[in-house]
Image (tube, grey):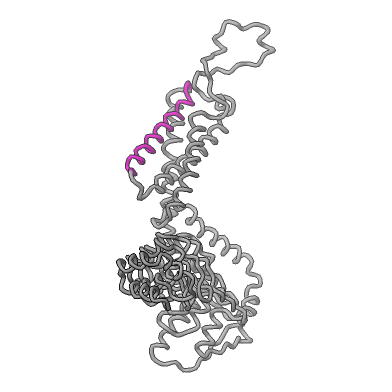
């Protein structure tokens, strides 16, 4: 190795920035030389030795070093992620967020390395990686494994939980059912061994994180070997499945398992069975039992549909939602607020511009009988209301509902933003303005009628909406 390169590597080990710049003054191309080798470059060495400041300095001088793989097929970010170096990960991601998507050995991205790491800081590293680049959760290895598969295989239940929490917040449930090249879901892998970590993973998937996570896990998915997760569990624990010819039930015979493994096996089997896990041999029996149960299936599907409703009606905005997503949603809802507000104060069909009472006009003559009879009206009242009051009321109710929902969501999306208090005041004043403007559309109908329409549009609808959202959130909490 070139003497200058050797000195540079030694400086990277100790974090000696003075030596770095001294070498650059003697040989300005030394970083270019280091960048051309398929082995540890100075940035790999600095990261491996946790020299954060030196790593940040050299990455700033030669950004391409951060994308290089060493002889082990790892980039500097792969190494930092596997070692649980949160500060180092932040520094590298600040340089380039796309580093999260660099594929190394076996097609692994840094998230895979963090997912399989036993370092106590791995959960924080996972959060940093997903926050910087959410799409790295969909990255697959050459074996079609997600970071979830990697976490299960390594027995890292805490890392697995960190991944599932993030997936749940982003509502990206589909990834929980993805298969590796052998057709195994994460549940197949979790049930393949009698370990406390595997039991915890099964419990997280099927019990702790609610209906949508459990549904996405697809408990009875069949892999390439024609096995469900319950089949894998039975095989791993020495079970033999014997369908009873008389009643279609399944009998289970197992070899003797002793100690803690027996308790783990017992608890895992209890969870799987309670959540509807089946063997492939169960399906033939199940088909027989389901004959004539069409009404039950319709009822079950209706219940499942109702359970989904709270997910759509919940107005909660996760604190971990990225600023880009928040800003995009804010633009959408502000456009809706603008459109509904404009419709409310200037309804379709326009407003009467003058006062008119044909019955009091002295110009009644024979020519008027052949003309259209004018309606009595007052300036500022809606023309549409005078012609079709029922459809106008429906329009204003729907428009006000859309306006109110959008205002609430705009406020929720600004959580954590500066000046949130003044934003609330401005939105409240806008609601008052909207309510008063709506009342003006019914001018001339008498004080009780105006009061009635004003109350209908400004009191019951908001209260009903609040109750609906509160109920949805309550159902959601129970379901969780």
The answer to whether 55 is drawn above or below residue 407 in the figure is below
Farthest-out residue, right = 370
The residue shown at (37%, 34%) is: 429
Q: Quadrant of residue 219?
A: bottom right
The answer to whether 374 is drawn above or below residue 146 in the figure is above
Residue 222: percent from left, percent from top: 60, 77
Farthest-out residue, front = 26
Residue 251: percent from left, percent from top: 55, 87
Residue 25: percent from left, percent from top: 36, 64
Front residue (pair 50, 168): 50
**Dominant SS type (magenta):** helix
The residue shown at (37%, 67%) is: 26
Residue 329 visible: yes
Front residue (pair 283, 15): 15
Quarter holding the C terminus?
A: bottom left
Residue 279: percent from left, percent from top: 58, 81
Quarter holding the N terminus?
A: bottom left
Q: In which quarter of the image is residue 281?
A: bottom right
Residue 435 painted magenta: yes
Tell me the magenta residue range. 419-444
Front residue (pair 132, 340): 132
Residue 363 painted magenta: no
Residue 479 visible: no
């Amino acid at each position: 190795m070139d003497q200058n390169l050797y000195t540079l590597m030694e400086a990277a080990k100790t974090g000696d920035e003075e030596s770095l710049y001294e070498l650059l003054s003697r040989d300005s191309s030394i970083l270019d030389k280091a960048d051309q080798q398929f082995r540890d470059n100075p940035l790999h060495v600095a990261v491996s030795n946790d020299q954060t400041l030196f790593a940040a300095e050299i990455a700033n001088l030669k950004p391409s070093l951060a994308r290089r793989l060493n002889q082990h097929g790892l980039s500097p970010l792969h190494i930092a992620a596997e070692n649980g170096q949160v500060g180092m990960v932040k520094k590298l991601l600040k340089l380039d967020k796309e580093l999260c998507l660099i594929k190394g050995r076996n097609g692994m991205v840094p998230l895979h390395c963090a997912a399989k790491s036993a370092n106590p800081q791995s959960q924080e590293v996972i959060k940093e990686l997903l926050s910087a680049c959410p799409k790295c959760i969909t990255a697959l290895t050459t074996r079609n494994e997600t970071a979830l598969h990697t976490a299960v295989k390594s027995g890292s239940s805490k890392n697995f939980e960190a991944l599932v929490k993030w997936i749940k917040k982003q509502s990206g449930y589909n990834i929980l059912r993805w298969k590796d090249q052998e057709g195994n879901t994460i549940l197949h892998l979790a049930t393949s061994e009698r370990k406390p970590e595997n039991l915890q993973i099964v419990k997280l998937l099927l019990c702790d994180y609610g209906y949508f996570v459990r549904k996405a896990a697809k408990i009875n998915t069949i892999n390439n070997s024609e096995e469900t997760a319950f089949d894998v569990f039975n095989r791993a624990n020495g079970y033999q499945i014997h369908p009873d010819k008389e009643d279609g039930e399944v009998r289970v015979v197992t070899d003797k398992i002793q100690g803690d493994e027996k308790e783990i096996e017992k608890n895992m089997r209890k969870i799987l069975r309670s959540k509807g896990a089946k063997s492939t041999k169960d399906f033939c029996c199940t088909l027989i039992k389901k004959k004539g149960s069409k009404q039950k299936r319709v009822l079950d599907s209706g219940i499942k549909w109702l359970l989904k409703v709270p997910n759509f009606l919940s107005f909660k905005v996760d604190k971990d939602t990225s600023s880009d997503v928040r800003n995009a949603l804010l633009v959408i809802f502000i456009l809706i607020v603008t459109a509904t507000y404009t419709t409310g104060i200037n309804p379709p069909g326009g407003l009467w511009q003058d006062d008119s009472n044909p019955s009091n006009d002295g110009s009644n003559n024979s020519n008027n009988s052949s003309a259209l009879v004018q309606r009595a009206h007052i300036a500022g009242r809606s023309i549409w209301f005078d012609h079709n009051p029922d459809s106008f009321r429906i329009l204003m109710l729907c428009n006000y509902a859309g306006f109110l929902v959008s205002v609430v969501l705009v406020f929720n999306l600004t959580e954590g933003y500066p000046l949130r208090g003044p934003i609330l005041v401005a939105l409240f004043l806008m609601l008052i303005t909207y309510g008063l403007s709506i009342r003006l559309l019914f001018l001339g109908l008498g004080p009780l009628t105006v009061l009635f329409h004003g109350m209908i549009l400004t009191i019951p609808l908001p209260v009903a909406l609040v109750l609906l959202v509160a109920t949805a959130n309550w159902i959601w909490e129970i379901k969780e």
